[in-house]
Amino acid sequence: MFPTRAHCIGQWLVLAALAAVVHSIGFASARQEVWVTTSKPDRVLVFQLDSEEGTLVKKREFSTSSAPGSFCFNADGNRLYISLKNPGSIAAYSLHGGSEPTLLGKVDTEAYAGYVNVHPTGRFLFGSYFATGEVSAHRILENGAVAREPIQRLAIDKNAHAAVFDPSGNYLFVPHTRPNRISQFRIDTKSGEFSRNDPSHLIRKTNTGPRHLWFHPRLNVAYGSDEQGSSISRYLFDPESGGLSFADSLSSLPDDYAGSNSTSDIEVHPTGRFVFIANRGHNSIAVFSTSDADGSLNFRDRAAVDPVPRSFNITPDGDFIIVAGQQTNRLKVFRISERGSLTSTQTLPIEGSPWWVVSRPRP
């Protein structure tokens, strides 16, 4: 058993510490909720994970006004923010135990936010917009609703794929798949305003396609999924300047694989000992171990999953990973061993195409 989605990335370091404390005092038997957005029909599914059996049981569902995509929770798990498509908007909900979520409001974002993320202060919601190449920040009101007008909305570069904070919350990073770069910003943590850092972006080589990014919980290191490159990259982070520098990368595929592929999601295990990355085409989750000294990577394991694994999530206790098969409309659950290997515990058919998978934080 280990002590922490990606709900909101800026919150995970706090959640990891809390999960470790809960584990150590014997509350590991508490059941974990796993939330999944689906289209056709447009709804959110809520499952309960049995930690002994490694199986999901559906507890409830609720419909959304249009197709739901990316979503995140606040650190306490009592607020939910869902990006909706056609038309683009963000819906905020209040959560009360196992009862029906209460809609706090919905704000028009003009375009679909492919990635939403609550700032570590809990006072701002950031979003990236793939189609329009923008990034935005909205204030979160005292009741948890999202302010109608953004604090700031900035056109930066096309294919903006994520909005990720460093552990301090002072810096923001936006990977772009086609321009092959990662935009870098400073954040005013009092106002929520953001400005371009110096340098304003990290450039990668052609056909790398930086897509998602995740920081190590202890080291000044971040890891990225390279969509076109079918690789995992390691970046060194300077907490003083707020800049990333490319260190190295490894293929996410077997040496003998000759088919088409692109990577999608990436997450670091709560302990920092492993990094997981999804392959679409090869349809697998690749696991890499990390060095305690510098975060360097070594291949550890690879597990077959359903096509197409757009999203996956590691539970806050680090014991399980849930992978969504977008093409087959199935969820696969794997138990994570102490050495990082994956053992399948369940394949669960669901109605609708799964888009985003997140474990609800437990206070």
Image (tube, rainbow, N blue to C red):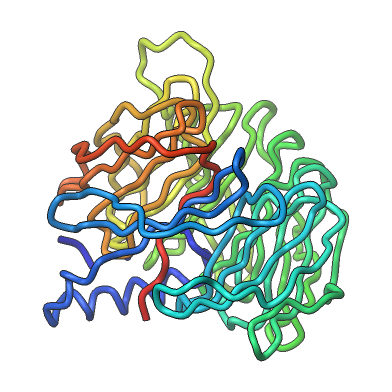
Q: Nearer the viewer, residue 307 or 250?
A: 307
Q: Is residue 250 left or right of residue 154?
A: left
Residue 236, compared with residue 339, is above or below; it is: below
Please identify the quadrant where the C terminus is shown: bottom left
Of residues 200 and 168, the one nearer the viewer is 168
Question: Based on the displayed image, in which of its 4 quarters is residue 119 positioned?
Answer: bottom right
Instruction: Specify the quadrant that holds the N terminus.
Output: bottom left
340 up-or-down from 255: above or below: below
Residue plotted at (76% across, 63% down): 198
Q: Position of residue 111 (x, y in %)?
A: 83, 51
354 lies left or right of 107: left
Q: Name the side, left or right, on which 327 lies relative to 93.
A: left
Residue 31 shows in this picture? yes
The residue lying at 22 percent from left, 71 percent from top is 30
- Rendered location of residue 94, percent (x, y): 57, 78
> What residue is at 39 percent from the left and 27 percent from the top?
306
Pick the front one: 107 or 124:
107
**Front-lying residue, 114 or 258:** 114
Q: Residue at x 37, y 35 (%)?
A: 349
Q: Is residue 202 visible?
A: no
Residue 90: % across, % down: 72, 63
